[in-house]
Image (tube, rainbow, N blue to C red):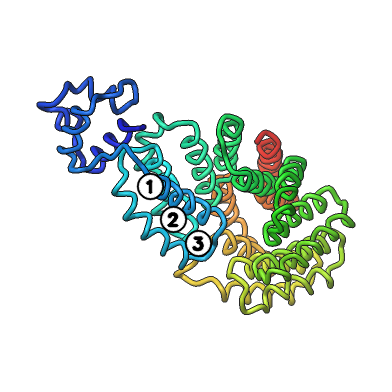
Amino acid sequence: MNIGSIIKMNRLKQNLKQEDLAEGIISTSYLSKIENGKIEPNDEVIKLLCMRLDIEINRQIDEETRELCYNWFHILLTSFKPSILKQEYQRMSELTNTIPDLELQILLKIHVIRYFLKIGETNSSLEQINQLKEISTTFSGKQKYYWFKFNGNYHSITEEDSKALQFYTMAEDLIAKNDLPDEEIADLQYVLGVTYSKLRLTSEAQSYANKALDFYRQIYNFSRCAECHLILGISYRRIQNYDKAIKNYQLAKQLAEHDDTTEIIQLTHLNLGYLYYAQGKTDQAIKYLDMIVEEKESSLENRLLALTAIVEEYYKANNYEEAKRRIEEGLGLITEENKERYLLFYYEIYTYRHLTERNLEKFEEMMVHEFIPYLEEQKDYARLTNYATLLANYYEDLHKYKTATKYYKLVNFSYKQINQI
């Protein structure tokens, strides 16, 4: 029933110490055992503790209420419309206060983490995580599954992919022991595929994307099928199987167009651009990337991703004039208000600005003291290999072989980190 968890959660919420709550009712040590799920208290003790906390306990829950809860869980899993999510959340907030003692109550509170992530309130989701962390050791198997998964979702959104993977794999380990909807399992397989892809673990990314795709085909979820084909396309590109990569990108685009999913169409164009770059087909690459840059509905992040790729390609092709034009275009999208959020792109674009302008002192200063430390802090090992190599080559050209060796070692370290994840 998780009564101990509910009592502990409400006590902490009211900033009460155990001795304050237990005084005159039970011993502090007995309360501690209740809160940690080691003892099931009798009804009289529960009543007295709840009176002091000013909460109501209702051990019964009707099927209609249970159905409402699980319907909300399903909406959180499948809907991406903030207006619908917020409307349902208001209904569930009122319901939450009427069932404070049941296991379902904890599930409701755990799902609030997902709710805040879905509507873009990352800080609120972290607050909810921190509130529940105190009682997480008492969670049942199903509660632990969602707890691990939504923690993974949080770390994925905050770009901490290694941490996300740890939580997702802990959730996966609990699947066999819990009765979970097939769609929920497929969603976990999908996010595992995404995470492995972001970590450059190609074989695992393919495996989980295919597992998820098998399910989404059965229920005709075209948008999620498109996203799975994107993961497969990226995986095939990385192993240089370009024909299969293009086939999967084309399937992703067709499915996204069927559902009119602009974001997925843009990601398809972005990855087609990357693919044609890998093949040395610069004109075709820029054609697809410019579709994103010029599309009014493109997110700022996607436009910056496309522009940084274009800048890098022009620089490598020694077309410095065109690189400079695109650099200024990219910097024009970054303001003081959004600089912190898009700091990665800021550093990437300024790297090539300093190089194209031959302002090598500023290039070295920024790389050594800002950009490389930033990538190390973020544990962005994929980009770290790229930019540490760039810096090592720079020092090698200056015949500073000792310093160059330092950054080549960083490149090797980054590769090892990717392989050990």
Tell me, for residue 337, which label it has, or none.
Answer: none
Which badge, 3 or 2, is on the more N-terminal residue?
2
- Label 3 sits on a secondary structure element that is loop
| Residues at discs 2 and 1 in contact (Cβ within 8 Å) | yes
Residue matched to label 2:
116
Asked whether, in this view, residue 147 is left or right of residue 260, the answer is: left
Identity of the residue drawn at 68% across and 65% down = 264
Q: In the visual, does 289 lie left or right of 59?
A: right
Residue 242 percent across, percent down from the top left: 87, 56
Q: Amino acid at mark 1?
A: Gln
Looking at the image, tell me whether mark 3 or mark 1 is earlier in sequence order. Answer: 1
Distance, label 3 to label 1, CA atoms, is 22 Å
Which secondary structure lies at badge 2?
A: helix
The one nearer the camera, 257 or 162, is: 257
Residue closest to the eye, 72 or 20: 72
Residue at left offset 84%, top offset 71%: 284
Q: Quadrant of the N terminus?
A: top left
Whole-number angstrom distance, CA of label 3 to CA of label 2:
19 Å
